Amino acid sequence: MKLSALIIDDEPLAHDVILRYLEDVSFVQVVGQCYQASEAIQVVNTQKIDLIFLDIRMPRIQGLDLLRTLRQKPMVIITSAYQEYALESFELDVCDYLLKPFRFDRFLKAVQKAYELYQLKNQEGNNLPVVSEPAPEQQIFIKSDKRFIQLNLKDIYYLEAYGNYIKIWLEDRYHLTMRTMGSFEEQLPENDFIRVHKSFIVNKNHVAYLEGKMVILKNNKRIQVGKNYTQAFKGFIQ
């Protein structure tokens, strides 16, 4: 089974790089090439396209604007020279984000991820747990130290307010990002994350036990439950 792919980029050299890389990828077949986003709309709406390699900055219609107009969205791998669109792209459920110029090994990882997602979506009668890489909605992108970092939600233990910044704690380290606690509270899935204090959001999956008004996580971190959050937290864990 091969993925039918469409390349959308206004630079011929970008097409050449993707085509050259795909010579060594047996499960992806390019069925179309567009040099403007406006050309791609009809192709996507009239042909079976499983995967799009999409540039962002193009004449007339930009890549992300194209995604917003599509009725049926294929899987999308962004190929862009601009990292500042990464967060916005993942909010549109793209499969991966490749920053130009990208190497073959990074390209291969992206298309393998797309292929695994395609197989899962099209596999009938599969009741087994999913063990492949998390889907895009199970990940977030944050800007930290002038870089965009992709984090799996399952790896996040808790978030801690730190002045105008947020510390996103993993098991034994953290990433610092300039955002508000409220913005994370809106973005994170409410089934897994809950605010227990004005300065803390915890991941329920990493709670080891409760001790009085303290939440003890599996990495032995102790977090106090704020008075205004006690009732909501009790309802959350029951």
Image: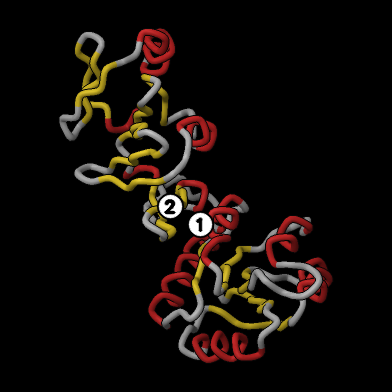
Outermost residue toward the left? 220
* Whole-number angstrom distance, CA of label 1 to CA of label 2: 12 Å
Q: Quadrant of the C terminus?
A: top left
Q: Where residue 183 sits in the image (x, y, percent)?
A: 52, 35
Please give the label number shown on residue 134: 2
Query: Which residue occupies 64% across, 76% down?
Result: 4
Residue at screen point 55% across, 62% down: 118
Name the amino acid type tagged 2: Pro
Q: Which residue is mark 1?
A: 120
Answer few, some or many: residues within 10 Å of disc 2's Cα (few below 14, many 20 plus, some between 14 and 19): some
Q: Secondary structure at mark 2?
A: loop
The x, y position of residue 229, in whole percent, is: 40, 13
**Could you tell whether 68 is left or right of 99 in the image?**
right
Question: Is 236 rendered above or below residue 129?
Answer: above
Quadrant of res 121: bottom right
What residue is rendered at 39% in x and 43% in y? 153
Determine the residue positioned at 64% across, 71% down.
54
Q: In screen coordinates, is 64 left or right of 70?
A: left
The amino acid at mark 1 is Leu
